């Protein structure tokens, strides 16, 4: 979708959402039951995925077993409410969910969830009673933070003891921030009141969506089902952020998590946050007090974060993978209207000195791959990544730059067309990427323009959040041996998704009777809404035949990284589609980055790793941080935790050094970009 159409869509959805929010539904703790239509939607989605998903799968006991575990993890991933006795009582359902998908039977998930609601309500009473008692911060007890792999408590008594540890740990976290014991109790009581209120607001359709996604998650992490209100809420969140911070949010457990950062918004331009970070508190204005939002629903949090254009909002952010006891960092943002047209490529020319030699380096930052498809179809002048970068390259040549750095960090993708045409600026015509359907049909996407806009030294800088279209571009440049890839291993998303509006398929009998396709009708009322289905339909492959799925693009020179490929990125998701290979295409590489050149570049880089004090310090800090993140058991003793907290804060300083900055004055502290300049200086020297 082009930028202009996106803005129109968001604005129109905002006006619709205003009407939708006028009604306030009532909630109770009565057992939830599936609506009559849910079973039919379940049947249709099951059959549709079985027919059209990229990866064929068998609906059998093995699938049922995984859905069962996924659903339990969805509602009690922390093993904090169910006991082993409860799990044993559910076991009768473990291997019947496959038949239930075809029959539309939702008895099992609703029975499990209704037990969970009762257990949750009982646990709320336990929590409130505990928080009235004095705390013992001198204990020798410890707390396991990685709870999903713990055994279920054998009975309520054992679960009570676990909850004493949970609450003591949460109290200790607050005490470490300087809060008094009495204020700790008040803060936690408010938090658990919000938790309880949130669960009380669960509707029947929420349970259905949760169960359906326990099913789709088994197939592929990018395939999911959205009930109508969820699909609408996603668009509402985007529209609400038109005068906000520019982020799409969702609930993740007890937290409000940043799912996406909208290009052109304040958060995007500040480069102060990343996807999958938690917003734990919000303050209005420079002098406003922070209000904790742990346990809040997303729509309530959005109301607090949203505000008038020009006003200040401060957030406390916590990375989802941060070690326990990590202090949230504060950021300050000025709310403004999102200007999608500002999320475009930018350029600068840097005078850089390396080994007593001076170089002029052109730096191009590409935050996303954009293209105004509407104006392109009309045949007029239109904005695109390729057009902008081509203009920059012409300016660079006029300024006699020695080499070009393309910064792809945090670029989550965008237009495939632009990834292909951008590659064409650096190579003669030829294949760029292959697409394979689930039926095995392979299409090769080519650059057909024989002209080359830049034939000098080229370096691409990527990180773990470079994904999709940016991986296609980087992979092609690497395969043609046209430029050097440095940084971190990219994300590894090599799949294509399509969004299906179920309203187009699930028709009422009245409509079906007048249509030749009457056999597709499933008996719904014409006015009923059925939600949306997102499913994976294709995979990308490089021109060599290698997939970008899971592996992404491996850099020619890997910079120090805090992330292991198995704990961040596509390969960290258990159900991610596998890496595989197909036949390669015919193409002619430039051989500009050959083994001899790479050997010399790596030798110089490894020399800096041993001699450069900044790099040596970074490596040490990242190693310490990685070890800290592996820690799963923490002391509940105040003095011990205080020491651990200080160590954690020192080690998180390493992460700040890897921040990408849009601010020219802050780029001198960008260690990745600084090292990229040194590497391309070496490349220029060697190729000369």
Image (spheres, rainbow, N blue to C red):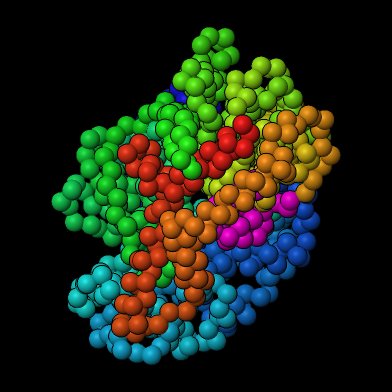
Please state if 658 lies on the left or on the right of 84 as rendered: left
| Frontmost residue, 138 versus 661 | 661
Which quadrant holds residue 281?
A: bottom left
Above-or-below relation of 643 to 544:
below
Q: Quadrant of the C terminus?
A: top right
Q: Which residue is drawn at 52% across and 28% down?
A: 402
Q: In which quarter of the image is the N terminus?
A: top right
Is 555 colored magenta in this rendering? yes
What secondary structure prevails in the magenta region? loop
| Frontmost residue, 500 versus 29 | 500
Across and down, in percent, residue 17 comes to 38, 37
Please state if 91 lies on the left or on the right of 279 as rendered: right
| Frontmost residue, 89 versus 483 | 483
Please state if 568 lies on the left or on the right of 180 as rendered: right
Please state if 637 lies on the left or on the right of 366 as rendered: left
Above-or-below relation of 362 to 138:
above
Is 212 colored magenta in this rendering? no
Q: Which residue is drawn at 27% across and 47% down?
A: 332
Q: Residue at x 73, y 30 (%)?
A: 590
Above-or-below relation of 393 to 78:
above
What segment is highlighted magenta in the picture? 552-579
Residue 670 in view in this figure: yes
Above-or-below relation of 12 to 376:
below
Q: Residue at x 76, y 44 (%)?
A: 546
Across and down, in percent, residue 559 comes to 55, 52
Residue 629 in view in this figure: no
| Frontmost residue, 640 versus 70 | 640
């Amino acid at each position: 979708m082009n930028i202009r159409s996106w803005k129109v869509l968001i604005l129109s959805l905002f006006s619709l959402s205003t009407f939708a929010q006028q009604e306030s539904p009532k909630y109770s703790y009565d057992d939830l039951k599936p609506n009559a239509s849910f079973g039919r939607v379940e049947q249709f989605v099951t059959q549709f995925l079985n027919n059209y998903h990229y990866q064929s799968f068998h609906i059998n006991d093995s699938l049922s077993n995984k859905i069962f575990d996924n659903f339990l993890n969805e509602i009690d991933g922390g093993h904090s409410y169910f006991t082993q006795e409860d799990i044993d009582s559910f076991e009768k359902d473990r291997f019947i969910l496959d038949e239930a998908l075809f029959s539309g039977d939702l008895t099992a998930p609703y029975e499990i969830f209704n037990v969970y609601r009762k257990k949750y309500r009982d646990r709320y009473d336990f929590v409130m009673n505990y928080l009235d008692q004095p705390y013992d911060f001198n204990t020798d007890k410890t707390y396991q933070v990685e709870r999903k792999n713990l055994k279920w408590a054998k009975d309520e008594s054992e679960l009570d003891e676990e909850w004493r540890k949970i609450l003591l740990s949460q109290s200790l976290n607050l005490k470490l921030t300087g809060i008094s014991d009495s204020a700790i109790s008040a803060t936690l009581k408010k938090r658990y009141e919000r938790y309880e209120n949130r669960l009380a607001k669960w509707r029947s359709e929420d349970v259905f969506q949760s169960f359906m996604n326990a099913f789709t998650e088994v197939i592929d992490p990018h395939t999911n089902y959205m009930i109508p209100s969820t699909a609408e809420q996603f668009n509402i969140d985007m529209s609400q952020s038109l005068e906000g911070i520019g982020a799409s949010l969702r609930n993740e457990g007890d937290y409000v998590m940043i799912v996406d950062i909208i290009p052109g918004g304040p958060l995007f331009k500040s480069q102060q946050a990343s996807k999958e970070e938690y917003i734990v508190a919000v303050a209005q204005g420079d002098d406003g007090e922070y209000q904790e939002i742990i346990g809040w629903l997303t729509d309530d949090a959005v109301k607090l974060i949203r505000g008038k254009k020009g006003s200040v909002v401060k957030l406390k952010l916590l990375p989802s993978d941060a070690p326990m006891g990590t202090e949230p960092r504060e950021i300050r943002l000025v709310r403004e209207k999102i200007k999608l047209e500002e999320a475009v490529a930018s350029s600068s020319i840097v005078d850089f000195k390396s080994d007593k030699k001076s170089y002029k380096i052109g730096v191009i930052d590409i935050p996303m791959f954009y293209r105004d498809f509407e104006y392109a179809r009309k045949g007029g002048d239109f904005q695109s990544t390729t057009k902008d970068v081509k203009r920059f390259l012409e300016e660079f040549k006029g300024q006699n730059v020695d080499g070009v750095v393309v910064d792809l960090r945090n670029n989550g993708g965008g237009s495939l067309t632009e990834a292909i045409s951008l590659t064409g600026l650096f190579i003669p015509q030829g294949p760029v990427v292959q697409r394979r359907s689930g039926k095995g049909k392979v299409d090769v996407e080519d650059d057909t323009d024989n002209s080359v806009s830049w034939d000098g030294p080229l370096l691409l800088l990527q990180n773990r959040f470079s994904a999709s279209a940016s991986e296609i571009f980087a992979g092609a440049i690497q395969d043609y041996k046209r430029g050097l890839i440095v940084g971190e291993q990219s994300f590894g998303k090599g799949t294509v998704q399509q969004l299906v509006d179920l309203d187009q398929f699930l028709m009422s009998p009245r409509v079906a009777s007048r249509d030749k396709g009457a056999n597709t009708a499933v008996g719904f009322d014409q006015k009923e809404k059925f939600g949306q289905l997102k499913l994976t339909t294709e995979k990308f492959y490089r021109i060599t035949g290698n997939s970008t799925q899971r592996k992404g693009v491996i850099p020619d020179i890997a910079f120090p990284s805090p992330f292991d490929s198995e704990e961040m990125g596509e390969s960290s998701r258990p159900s991610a589609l596998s890496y595989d290979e197909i036949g390669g295409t015919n193409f002619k590489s430039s051989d500009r980055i050959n083994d001899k050149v790479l050997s010399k570049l790596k030798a110089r880089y490894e020399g800096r790793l041993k001699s450069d004090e900044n790099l040596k310090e970074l490596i040490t800090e990242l190693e310490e941080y990685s070890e800290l993140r592996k820690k799963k058991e923490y002391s509940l003793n105040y003095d011990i935790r205080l020491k651990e907290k200080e160590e954690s804060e020192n080690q998180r300083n390493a992460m700040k050094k890897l921040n990408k900055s849009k601010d020219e004055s802050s780029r001198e502290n960008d260690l990745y970009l600084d090292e990229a300049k040194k590497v391309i200086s070496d490349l220029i020297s060697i190729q000369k």
